[in-house]
Image (spheres, helix red, strand yellow):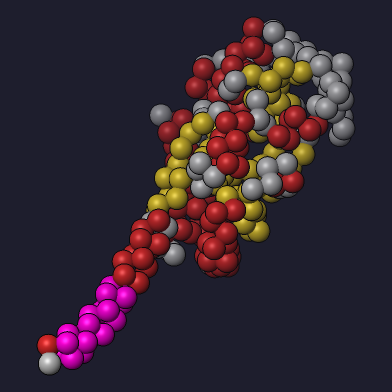
Amino acid sequence: MMKNISGYITRPLVLLLLISLNSVMSISVKSEELTLTLTKVAGEHNEITVAATRILSEAYENIGINVNIEELPSKRALFLSNKGITDGELIRIDNIDLKYTELIKVPVAYMSIRHMVWTKNVVLPCNEKINLSPYLIGFNRGYLFAEGVTNGMNKYAAGSFQQVFKMLDLGRVEVAIATDYTGNSVIRELNLQGISMLPTPLDITPVFHYLHDKNKHLLDRITSSLQKMQRDGRFNKIISQVATEFKNSHSK
């Protein structure tokens, strides 16, 4: 008799145990998605990176995920995100996944950046096509656009944009490559004088968010979230708000 009762009791208990285990596993999976750590280039506190942080934070918040931003040197950031030690890249140019093959591009360009040439003691002709080959060129290590456009030229890759512009100021490099936002931000930060930006960009490129392959299950959700923000005009609104904040802070 006890055996029969035990048998009847065991089945629902096993079922309950399985349901509970499944619930715990579901909660565990969800908890892993609660926070993503994305890397950005250290020393780039400018309108682009601030706007990118706000846009992506809102996009992920809309799908129930928090975002943590970690600042690292550019090349190290790419190394860690490609290895899956971090979850992805906040903001990078197109096609970096051709080299860093574990990264997946989220196919929504939410801003564009202008790659500019900066000089101090060297006068360059303001032509539509800028020839940098006669000069010693400085840029931040891991700045993939600059690495590509200066291939075969005389160049120096520094550890930060701050170092690049200090070298330009001291005449240790003749020209520098940086985006307009980054260059202006570093010049203000270091209070440098006499450095000017050529008016013609080397290129204007869209920028994207990248996820490590381990997070590919989030690709469709974050893509949809960003597309909705784009349709609703949130990108432009956030970018305008950030631009106003920077303008007001610099006028004080």
Q: 221 or 196: nearer the eye?
A: 221
**Does residue 226 appear anywhere in the picture?**
no
**Which image quarter is the C terminus in?**
top left
Picture quarter with the N terminus = bottom left
Measuring 59% from the left and 16% from the top, which residue is drawn there? 163
Q: Which residues are magenta?
A: 3-20
Magenta run includes residue 81: no
Q: Residue sitting at 46 percent across and 30 percent down?
A: 250
The residue closer to the viewer here, 196 or 19, is: 19
Left or right: residue 3 versus residue 81 is left
Residue 238 in percent (x, y) is at 49, 52
Instruction: Kindly identify the residue that appears in the image at 62 percent across and 56 percent down.
Output: 106
- Residue closest to the eye, 205 or 100: 100
Residue 221, compared with residue 187, is above or below; it is below
> What residue lies at 74% left-to-right and 30% top-to-bottom?
146
Place of residue 136 in the rendered image (x, y in percent of width and height, measured from the top left): 78, 14
How many discs mark residues in the rendered view? 0
